[in-house]
Amino acid sequence: MSAFDFFDDIWCINHAAHAKRWPVMERRLARLGIAERTRRFPSIRSPADERIGRALSHRRIVQDAAERGLRCVLVIEDETLFLDRALSVLAAATAELRGRAWRLLYLGTWRGSEGLAAEPGCDHLRQAGDRTAPDAVAYGAAVFDDLLGRLPSAFIAMQRHLGENGTLDTTLAGLGPALVVDPTIATVPLCLPFQDPADQERFVP
């Protein structure tokens, strides 16, 4: 049994402009033992502004989960790096999550979990506050309707929404309370320098 079995479904968004990332990501997923479970989601094309395609892709995945009555869905983006001990940390975190009401679970944030308040009674969960990370996020059923209500489904409407409200991160920050796995088990290359120095070399390329 894998720690990732906690999630009913797993998707990886492969950005339209970066098709070559997919084979690399498949190798990373295989190391975690979830390559066969993870479904590739070709991101919705938005050449002028990738933020639009990113937000629409997340929304479509959540809509699919809601329509199928899932308990939760994990969304991973195609640049995500995983900590070498991700499986053991995630197992501990999801064990603490069982039986709790939750909306969003980040496998990491742009600057990890350092400085975040601990979730009461938990050793491997912290409260995200306004710190987000759509690169590897699990959506719980409790947040499905709220997210679908806030993010429009049409391209032009999403473009307008992001113009008025900022990025997908901004929307997610308003959907809390959210939790973060501690220590962080997922990040992207751009955010790697902001992770715990003791773990920076332990994220597997």
Image: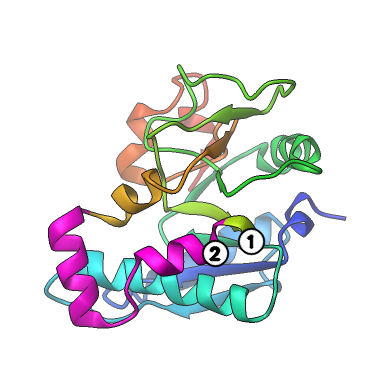
Kind of residue at badge 1: Ala
Q: Between marks 1 and 2, how big is the CA–CA gap?
A: 5 Å
Tell me where residue 143 sits by quadrant: bottom right
Q: Which residue is drawn at 24% across and 64% down?
A: 51
* Dot label at residue 58: none
Does residue 42 appear to the left or right of 51 in the view shown? right
Quadrant (top left/top right/bottom left/bottom right) for the N terminus: bottom right
Does residue 90 appear to the left or right of 151 in the view shown? right
Magenta part of the chain: 143-166
Q: Residue at x 61, y 74 (%)?
A: 65
Tell me where residue 34 sits by quadrant: bottom right
* Dot label at residue 144: 2
Which sits in the foreground, 102 or 25? 102
Q: Which residue is drawn at 34% across and 38% down?
A: 191
Does residue 173 appear anywhere in the picture? Answer: yes
Disc 2 packing (10 Å; few <14; some 14–19; many ≥20): many
Principal secondary structure, stretch drawn in magenta = helix
Tell me if residue 159 is in the magenta stretch.
yes
Q: Percent from the top left, x then y, of residue 32?
A: 68, 54
Q: Percent from the top left, x then y, of residue 115?
A: 45, 16
Image vertical order of residue 193 relative to residue 38, above or below = above
Which sits in the foreground, 174 or 47? 174
| Mark 1 lies on residue | 141
Q: What element carries label 1?
A: helix
Kind of residue at badge 2: Phe
Q: Percent from the top left, x then y, of residue 24?
A: 48, 64
CB within 8 Å, label 1 to label 2 = yes
Disc 1 packing (10 Å; few <14; some 14–19; many ≥20): many
Q: Is mark 2 on a helix, strand or loop?
A: helix
Tell me where residue 91 sits by quadrant: top right
